[in-house]
Amino acid sequence: MTKGKDEMRRQLASLSFTEKIKILEKLRDRSLGLAAVGLRQKRVSEQPIVGKETSANRKEE
Amino acid sequence: MGNFVDNGFVKRTIELINALQVDGIIHHYAIGGAVAATFYLEPAATLDVDVFVLLSNPGGSLVSLTPIYEYLKARGGIEDREHIVLGDWPVQFLVPANDLETEAIAASIPVDVEGVRTWIMLAEHLVAIAISTGRAKDYIRVVQFIKEKAVDQVILQAILKNHGLLSKWEQFQHKYLEGSS
């Protein structure tokens, strides 16, 4: 497994700079995508539940 | 290695930085940081490009990057805090903070990206700057450089010695390299 990883690293390191830059662009797009998903999830979880009656928000009639 | 999407963003970014040099806004530049390290190592995720510049007219003690920002904004660059976004890549322009970084710019090597010429710092300078900066993420990169034998030890030792970094290097070796082979 480690040998496979090392071999993969060597293969990646031996690519041309142009090819590596294209990988960098993909890695960056993926990181930004993941960060955006994280932010969306955070916003959703922080939103109050609207329209659902609970014992906490029930008004006394 | 499969097909990668060629969106040409980095090429456009480099063309804009080269234009700064052609039009005399900067004297010379070199890419440093993670993007430069990628030239020597496997690609590692980064969100921006670090560009070290020697200004054409550095002025007095107060160095301003305003001419660079104004030039690039007039050509579509968008200022975003410490970055300017060029061709979809946030670029951070840095003036050398010390002699080591000035030397690293001067000794940078020409490299082609999609047929466009750019300048990349030497691996030994990238390692020396990382040792000088001393952040954890920089140390991780130095370990990679050493493990992959991507640096010339004679050149590295000379640079470290010239810039008074030998004791920092010894501390780094003791903490991160001893016992690992």
Image (spheres, rainbow, N blue to C red):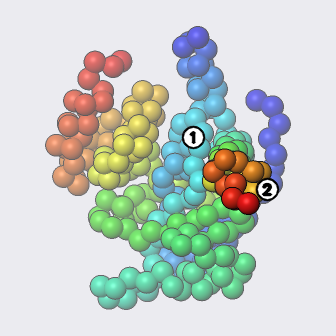
| Residue at the spot 60% in from the left edge and 39% down from the top edge | B43
Subunit under mark 2 = A
- Three-letter code for the amino acid on which mark 2 is drawn: Gly
The secondary structure type at the circle numbered 2 is loop
Circle 1 residue: B44
Dots 1 and 2: beta carbons under 8 Å? no
Quadrant of image for the N terminus of chain A: top right
Q: Position of residue B54 (x, y in %)?
A: 44, 73
The secondary structure type at the circle numbered 1 is loop
Q: Is residue B43 above or below residue B73?
A: above
| Residue at the spot 80% in from the left edge and 41% down from the top edge | B4
Circle 2 residue: A51
Q: Is residue B53 above or below residue B23?
A: above
Q: Is residue B149 above or below residue B128?
A: above
Quadrant of image for the C terminus of chain A: bottom right
Which corner quadrant of the image does residue A50 belong to? bottom right
Q: Do we see residue A25 in this rendering?
A: no
- Three-letter code for the amino acid on which mark 1 is drawn: Ala
Q: Position of residue B11 (x, y in %)?
A: 72, 60
